[in-house]
Amino acid sequence: KGWGWDEVLPFFKKSEDMTIPSLRGSKLHGVGGGLTVSEFPYHTTLADIWEKACATAGIPAHTDYNDGKCTNGATRGFQTTTRNGSRCSSAKAFLHPILKRKEKGERINLDILTHAEVLKLIIEEKKDKSKGSVCSGVRYVRLDDPERSPREFRATREVIVSCGSVGSPKLLMLSGIGPRAHLEEVGIPVVKDLPVGENLQDHIMTGILMYVKSPTFGPQMLSVGNLARYVLMKKGPFSSNGMEGNAFLQSGVRKEIGGAPDLQFMFSPQGGEAGDGDNLINKIMNIDIKRFPKRENLCTKKTKYGVNLLVALVRPKSRGRIRLKSNDPAEDPEIDPRYLEHPDDVKAMVAGMKRALKVLESQHFDSERIEIAGDKCNWCENPHEKYSDAFLEHYIRHRTFTVYHPTSTCKMGAPDRKDTVVDPTLRVLGVEGLRVADASVMPEIVSANTNAASIMIGERAADFIISSKTYRNAS
């Protein structure tokens, strides 16, 4: 309740500064917010083929994939949070302008403490224990303090946890808010028994490599001339992240979500270089290639240039969880994503790979295509027929990786539901003065990148806090 399209759209628009000319006047986009949205100023010639190839595979061109109607559509380029050829992070969009005002002498109620790590939340019982607990501050250490002596910040109003879908459940559980059996197992006194850390969801991705004739992103583009072009004019290959085409579509597997897309295609003219061995894309995605089976016979013809058509599952059914390894705040938590555990996720990815092959096999790529890689299933004792369902399932299970979009581990919902951690105003159930505001509160993962949605959650949290009686009384 309170988080439907009409309720959240104003908060998306509030933070946005849309600079793409064709979308700047849209009622669905904002202008003047801190978060700059633009298109990459540089494209390879392959980007011009993308929409035509998608159309032949039954994915028509679509102008604005954020209009709520893009259930099956392709676009050349992306709406990206970039400004002048570089990333417009949430820090650049929101924190830096405030800090500049503070440097000029304005009275700003923001202090940023770096080189510090929160150990746990300070939670105290109310005098009337039947009325629950209250969060009154945080206990932390300075990482530049050789003694690592615990220190405290006390809150006069509320404590807002915004540590992400791994960090937020970790901090709550270290503070005694989480599944009772698990907290007792690691020796943490239970403050509130809630399903913290459950319901972990993430986007996963695999892809198909095709060798082409035209130059693509890679070492050959990383020249001194292109670097100078970027430094002086913010243009050229360095102004792009290498993603040039996008599409949202339905696999046909998940009937229960109606017309919503459950797959995303991302067309990336990078990778597959003879002298690169996919090192560029492996570094970008933090892929440890040693964990993957060796690919053999990928291309029988000599070529330097390759494109990747990435297939992402954006509405997974599989659910993972976050758990503590111990009660030591310095120890990383255990992340069990359980990717592809639900059979429908595999079926959807297989359907996506088949559709992606149709795009790459389109006649519009005939003038560029040298060969589609992957003609040998070399990790099986009995290799499957190339691109059969069995081949694709094995390929997906062996060569799928995270898109780094974890969500939903502090699930928002109605207070009377057993799977709820925070209520619709982001307050942690049973603990007064404590909210969570990040991607961990999403009941289900969004069918797109999580960055803008997470910023929207922050905007809503600010609105809830300003509108609360606690805030007004404290003022």
Image (cartoon, grey):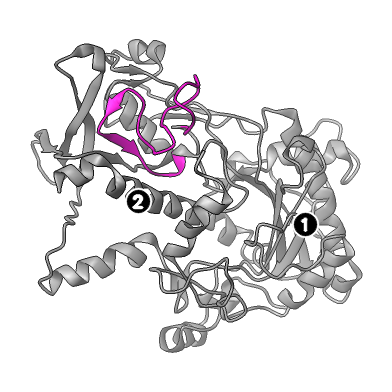
Q: Is residue 214 above or below residue 255?
A: below
Q: Which residue is rendered at x = 91% and y = 41% of the image?
A: 385
Q: Is residue 279 above or below residue 381?
A: below
Residue at x-position 66% and y-position 67%: 64
Secondary structure beneath label 1:
loop
Question: Residue visible at 24% across and 40% down?
Answer: 469
- The question of residue 435 being in magenta is answered with yes
- Residue 230 horizontal/vertical position (percent): 46, 83
Q: Amino acid at mark 2?
A: Asp
Q: Which residue is mark 2?
A: 463
- Asked which quadrant contains residue 292, the reply is top right
User: The residue under label 1 is which amino acid type?
Assistant: Asn
Q: Position of residue 66 (x, y in %)?
A: 62, 61
Q: Which residues are magenta?
A: 411-440
For mark 1, what is the residue?
Answer: 72
User: Is any part of residue 379 visible from this angle?
Assistant: no
Pick whichever, 459 or 60, lies toward us: 459
